[in-house]
Amino acid sequence: MKNLRKQFPVTSHSTYLNTAATGLLSEKVFEYQQDQNLELLTLGSLFRDKKSNLMEEVRERLAAFFSAEANKIALVPNFSFGFNILLEGLEKETKFLLIKEDYPSINLAVESRNFPICYAEISENLEKNIYNAIKEHKPDVFAFSIVQYISGIKLSQLFLQQLKKDFPELLIIADGTQFCGTENLNFRELGIDVLGASAYKWMNAGFGHAFFLFNENVATKIYPKTKGFGSNIGKYKQEENAFIGKFEPGHLDTSAIGAILPAIDLIESIGISTIEEQLKTLSEHAKNAFSKLDLLSTEVKLRKNHSTIFNIKGDEKLFHRLLENNIICSQRGDGIRVSFHYYNTVEDIEKLLDILK
């Protein structure tokens, strides 16, 4: 893992604990995007002609990586863009279940449309809270982040699978922006209907690219109204009223969209199972150390499994002290958020702990 840090120049001068805010751009992705821009500079419209099959290639690569169907993957500039298109395709009386204090791109987007809404509280019993809320309020849609952006609390794949078995009519829409790229994922077996994610965090693909994976039944429940040039152009979008085409009006940035290809190349060269194991090691080490220093909330301390996102107790003075020591992190909620990816090491955690102590 230490050798892989050479792909991420920021790690040579800083202890980067901020992937939950922005994933590091690898040299591999940077070189790809530079090459794309150089071709656009020198070829003009011929560059677009040359890239006519790019969307198809990206769709098929994502399908293979996430065990999904290529003809049910939409490519969008960011998660918020795609999620808002999706919401416009639902009836106004659709009832939502949300998680309180979930990511604003989910909760604000739903709340601004005045859908009927019920909420599940974040606690050490989040799964139980969600399950009970579904039984009590009988929502039509459950929209949520798989990993909570402030606390790092994570819903397991097994729980999501069980949820779909117990409530098969419930439309389950997940934001995987803080999740995709951290562990192996088989979308066909995940038990959710829609998985959307921006690729600039744990996928390390840079800005300007997100994807939405749909199961086969979604097109009979959601009716997006968006259309434009490009909506029916290209493989998988040429049939009448192609569902994924509703998410892709107009021209997309091919250098941004295509950056997912070298990003996946890098992940696969390491091995997603290797990444998952590394993150588990970092998470357990950090949680044990933070717990001993009484830096974690009760709900996080009491949960068995956790992501690599932690919100530790600390004020603005401590936050600036960390920055002064070249530890890059964020202020979120009432504390300081630190997050670890595969280019981090136990030594990074120990450097943070030395300052915290």
Image: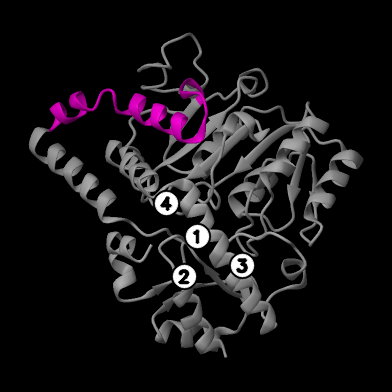
* Residue at position x 68%, y 33% in the image: 191
Rounded to the nearest angstrom, the CA distance separating label 3 from label 2 is 16 Å
Secondary structure beneath disc 1? helix
- Quarter of the image for the C terminus: give it: bottom right
Compared across the picture, whether 136 is left or right of 284 comes to: right
Residue 200 tag number = 4
Main SS class of the magenta portion in the image: helix
- In the displayed structure, 263 sits above or below 152; it is above
**Looking at numbered disc 1 in the image, what kind of residue is underneath it?**
Gln
Magenta-colored stretch includes residue 71:
yes
Residue situated in front as seen by the camera: 315 or 160 = 160
Q: Which residue is mark 1?
A: 278
Residue 87 position, x and y percent, is 62, 34
Of label 4 and label 1, which has the lower sequence position?
A: 4
Indicate which label's residue lies in the foreground, 3 or 4: 3
Is there a contact, CB below 8 Å, between mark 3 and mark 2? Answer: no
Of label 1 and label 3, which has the lower sequence position?
A: 1
Of label 3 and label 2, which has the lower sequence position?
A: 2
Of label 4 and label 2, which has the lower sequence position?
A: 2
Secondary structure beneath disc 4? loop
Indicate which label's residue lies in the foreground, 1 or 2: 1
- In the displayed structure, 238 sits above or below 32; it is above
Of label 1 and label 2, which has the lower sequence position?
A: 2
Confirm whether residue 181 shows in the render: no
Secondary structure beneath disc 2? loop
